[in-house]
Image (cartoon, coloured by chain):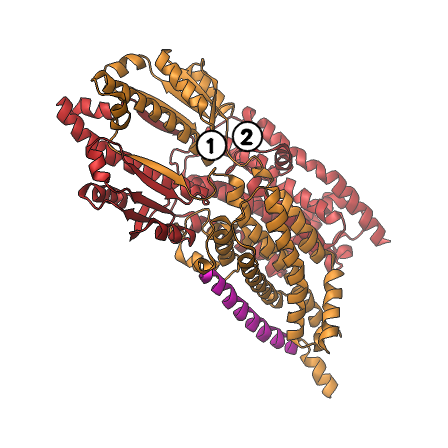
Chain colours: A red, B orange
Amino acid sequence: MFQALNEAFIYELKSIRRSWYKLILITLLPLLGFTLIISIFKSGVAYEMPIAVVDNDKTELSRMVLNHIQANATMKISYTLNSTKEALNLVKSSKVYAVVVIPRHFSRDTLLQKQPHITAMINTQYILIGKILTSALSSTLMQSSAQIEYVKNLVDLQNPHASINSISPIGIQITPFFNTFKNYFYFLVSALLPAMWQIFIVITTLVSIGVIFKNKHERLCFKNARYVPMKLIGLLLPYTIAFTLIGILHILYMYSMWEFQGSFSVMVFGIFLTVVAYQGIALLFFATGFDYARSLSLGAVYTAPAFAFLGVTFPVYNMNNFALFWRDMLPISHYMQLQISQANYGADIFFDADKLLVLFSFWVVFIPVFMLFYKRLKKEMH
Amino acid sequence: MNFRDTFKNEVKLIFSDAAIILTIIAGVILYSFLYPQPYANQSVSELSISVVDYDKSDVSRDIVFKLNATPQIQVTQNNMSEQDAKDALIKDEIKAIIIIPKHFKKDLALNKSPTIAVGADSSYFLIYGGVLEAAMKSILTQSATIKVANLLKKQVPLNTAKEAYTPYSLNIINLFNKDNSYTQYVVPAVFILILQQTLLIGLGILGGGINERMRRKEDEYFQTAPFWYMVLSRILIFGSIFFIHILFYFGFSFELFEVTRLANITDLLTFAVAFLLAAISFGIFLGTLFNSREIATPAVLFSSLPLIFSVGFIWPLESIPNSIHYLSLLVPSTPAIHGFLGLNQMGASFDMIIENYTILWVQTLVYLSLSTLIFIKRRRTFYANQQELQKG
């Protein structure tokens, strides 16, 4: 029985050695995909986003405000214009992300304590960019306004400490838990790489089994319809090893930069469970019709939208029931929960036992897979 | 072989291929319903948080009330100890903890600027951002109230105090997608990518399949048909199918998911035609390169995530390496997403997105020329021996 497994394992290893396509599927392509994603977000923070300013006041005070904005690394004043309409057209044609308008009589109204409003019009079609700019502009304006208030308070109170406290009667201290860097690289990349990883697992599994059937090598590989499960396991094994290693590599890479709070062995176990779960699902897609190209289409429909369902960008709490159901049907969302719980929270194995159990429960797909393959092969061998 | 026969053969080949039909018809329709599902509730709201109130004064209760009034958060626990709150956070029952210190009210009165601590789970950035936005807003409002009250104590008239508590302020206007809806953000861009990718897979399977059969020297229409007849057939077949898809996506789906439609129909369709031609040309080009039917799906699938994130609508172009940005301009989806978002989501006029329109036409010309060169060369190689045999 184990000889069957061994034979199939050797068969597939040899075929990988012969086929450059299979070889790059488990080496070059995943690494290239990972590298692209990593390079896109490499900077981690958004900087020098172009904005336009319209200064209707043109006084020393308005120039001071603009200097404060210019000094903020998040944005860059790319256009200084005289008309708001012109500036808005620049937003519409995506030349700038925001327009800051300083009103007429800004300086005078400030002196008269009439609290003039500086207007910032922000392109919130791009939510993340909009949020980053909103907070950068708010904090810059708050700082520059506080400076003026401080001077005024100092005159009134004659006490520097009291002057500061009067500006903001309540202090705010913000602590980000778990991802102390508040870095977008970490937010996005730590979820995007697993999302790519599951695509590669499913596609590679389909390629390995699909090529056998397409080239009519079933007889060569399965010989007879005996020990079908063992032979399938043997065929999958090289890829199980490859993708478990790639999964580990991803963890090692990410957490060479950030602290990994949890247990590395629990994580590796979770990676292994996920790889096998996806291999089983891929085989099920194939067994629905034993048609190579069609099973790839099914694999694409299943794996491509997974990132959106992970809940890393849009929170799970606000998803509707169908989205939650579909999310539960994707092993990668359970894997992602495990990764966040292990890496960020440092949860112990008992806490995460449920996640591991769910990942393991996907293995149940192997029952129909073995049955369908057995039926098909038995029919073909006769 | 004349055009009519080429066209008929192409139609037969495409519609008898389950993998192609599954992708370009069933896939496109399925995706249009599946993709927007996670965002159906549109925005982040009512995140559970816990307030640890050591002060228990009317001022601290007022702050809790203000926090509860924001749409983003809901205070579900305000009698927990700090330790219990931390445990609840790890168990994912709450997303943030806000701590109001002891003697808060007293310190306020003494102008000692007591500090409120806000701790939030930053594993999920929309959650983190939402909690922070709501907390900042409530606390700053409370601060302003206190400052006004302090001015009133100094006999400043109320009307003046309401303005004078700060020198100037910032008024933020959200230009498009005013409610920060996630559907509005993701769906219009991702739909373009879905249309392109399914189109590329369909044409890739077709082209790869023909290459496979030419290698086997099959005696079929593609052995003799002029390549331009094949190109024209594909533009007609895929063009009309995807033109209907575009009407379905921009009409029916956008309506269903309440996505803004600002573009006028002429501009939108003019741009859509350029997009379809560019995508079809790119698909034909990829098809001439693929050696088998089964390369297209993996190749296109692997490119999806890097492509959507290099467009620049999620992560700003200014922070993406130039080399990746230029590389992404080789693919129609990049200029197409910029153009469609401009026209339909931001109400740009056609001349504001003319650059993207031009890029699509350049892509069409370049990819069609390249395809012609490659296809003719490959066909000659594939059938080379046969021709010699025939001659001999």
- The x, y position of residue A6, in whole percent, is 69, 47
The chain carrying label 2 is A
- Residue B69: say if magenta: no
Q: Position of residue A150 (x, y in %)?
A: 19, 29
The N terminus of chain A is located in which quarter?
Answer: top right
Name the residue tied to disc 2. Answer: A317
Total marks placed: 2
Q: Is residue B371 magenta?
A: yes
Q: Secondary structure at mark 1?
A: helix
Looking at the rendered structure, the kind of residue marked 2 is: Tyr
Q: Are marks 1 and 2 in contact (CB under 8 Å)?
A: yes
Q: Quadrant of residue B97?
A: top left
Q: Is residue B216 above or below residue A104?
A: below
Residue A82 at x, y percent in the picture: 29, 51
The span shown in magenta is B354-381
Q: Is residue A103 above or below residue B157?
A: below
- Determine the residue positioned at 58% across, 27% down: A353
In the image, B285 versus A112, the foreground residue is A112
Q: Residue furthest bottom?
A: B392
* Residue B90 numbered tag: none
Compare residues A335 and A28 and report the one nearer the observer. A335
Rendered view: B333 above or below B31? below
Asked which secondary structure carries label 2, the reply is helix
Q: Mark 1 belongs to which subunit?
A: B
Residue at (47, 26) in percent of width and height: B73
Q: Main secondary structure of the magenta part?
A: helix
Query: Where does label 1 land, which residue?
Result: B127
Q: Amino acid at mark 1?
A: Ile
In the picture, measured across the screen, residue A60 lies left or right of residue B42, that is left
